[in-house]
Amino acid sequence: MMQNSITVAPGTSALQVLPNEKIRIENALWGLFIADALSMPAHWYYKLKYLKRDFGVINGYNDAPHPHPESFMVGNGYHPDVSKAKALGRSYDILHDHIRFYNTAYNHFAIQTAERAGEHANAMPVLNERYHYHHGLKAGENTLGANLVRVLMRSVIAKDGYDQDAFLHDFITYMTTPGNNKDPYCEIYIRAWFENYSKGVAPELCAQKQSAVWSIGSHGGVIRPLVLSILAKEPYQGFGQAISHQQLTHRSENVSSALGVLVPLLHALLRGEGPQETISDYAKNVRLIKISGEDLSKTYRAHKGPGNIPKDQMWSIHTEFSDQYLDVNRVLTEYSDEEIIGKLFATACYPEHGLPLLLCLLQRNNTDFKASLLANANAGGDNVHRGMILGLLAGACNTAIPDELKSGLLAYNELKKEIRDFVNLL
């Protein structure tokens, strides 16, 4: 197995960290977990009228409600090669208690998904069986995406630096051990990864390609690489390490492009550069996708769900960019929040849409930590994964964040130690 590692030698520092910079790094990490938990209850509420009906205005932590009016988690597929996995001695069950929500190679799926509803006209069950993506999670509780960041952080702490093989081992162990994951929602990249793993593919090669499964190009591929880049001395090295880690789970051009902007932006904010000017400058490197906002939703609905769009057309929809670059200040001057959210930029899981949206939300709220995170939560869509990216940036902009948002996290005590231990490696 190929090994890829960053080792922090005793008595040395991967990054020459000043006191305020260390505080901003801690706050960036807190921002990730806080944004995730704030957004969790309204995750993938595409229609804001439903979000407002069920929550009013989100201003703190909430339980995941039931039912979720637009949830299409129920019936998602997971089809590992069970026979091959058993012969190889590889664990394949990553769903455990949540298997009732999925159509898999090793269970009988009994919930019907005959209706087509929601923003993208995906197949759904009847309303009382539209279980929330994070069904059962309580106020202040983190999703699987955030907990996999913790898997990475704990791996780095245990090894005194990043080790690719150690992370892959910890990732496999976490996902295949019953009781570890309380979150029912398992992103498609994880299911695709373990389908390949069950067939005997080497762990470092199990990632699916965006060209084969369009949703591999998602915000979820940005989060852990962006966190890992913090360990590097400067953004040049950080970007290389981020891309290397990304390829373990997301073989996606769009994820890589987003990291090309986000890694140097995060490092600049952590250094204490003026946040609003810095965000505006880096946003000008973000090229805008051709089919965006309402046009993307209309295209999905016209085909009765994105799964019915031919792969070559789907590839074009997500990779053909316009000749325009993001001018955040112009967008904020010319458009209202109602026009920006969903109409101008789609709130779906794709970074070509979410990156310009999160930069606009951050800039609109003057990089205020709480206001920015709540604006993202109330924007719906893929607010969880988009929010973790925004939370990193918002935390990096601030040397103080509200204590009640930290202490309101259910894993507060564990997170406090893990964040401190991770930062102490720098």
Image: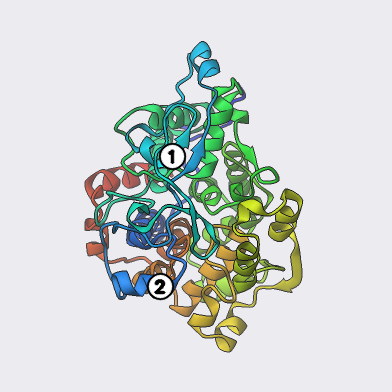
Quarter-wise, where is residue 314 in the image? Answer: bottom right
* Placement of the C terminus among the 4 image quadrants: top left
The label on residue 373 is none
Left or right of 223 in this view: 150: left
Q: Which residue is at 52% across, 11% downward?
A: 87
Q: Which of 263 and 255 is in front in this view?
A: 255
Q: What element carries label 2?
A: helix
According to the image, label 1 marks what residue? 102
Q: Label 2 is placed on what type of residue?
A: Ala
* Residue 276 seen anywhere in this rendered image of the structure: yes
Q: Which of 424 and 325 is in front in this view?
A: 325
Which of the two discs, 2 and 1, labels the residue nearer the N terminus?
Answer: 1
Quarter-wise, where is residue 144 in the image? Answer: top left
Q: Which residue is at 41% across, 46% downward?
A: 185
- Scheme by which the image is coloured: rainbow
Q: In this view, does 76 lie above or below 96?
A: below
Q: Label 1 is placed on what type of residue?
A: Tyr
Q: Residue 340: give x, y in percent of width and height.
A: 54, 78
According to the image, label 2 marks what residue? 375
* Residue 58 seen anywhere in this rendered image of the structure: no
| For the residues bearing labels 2 and 1, Cβ distance under 8 angstroms | no
Q: Which of 150 and 206 is in front in this view?
A: 206
Q: Residue 199: give x, y in percent of width and height.
A: 59, 22
* Placement of the N terminus among the 4 image quadrants: top right
Mark pair 2, 1: CA separation: 32 Å
Q: Nearer the viewer, residue 73 or 406?
A: 73
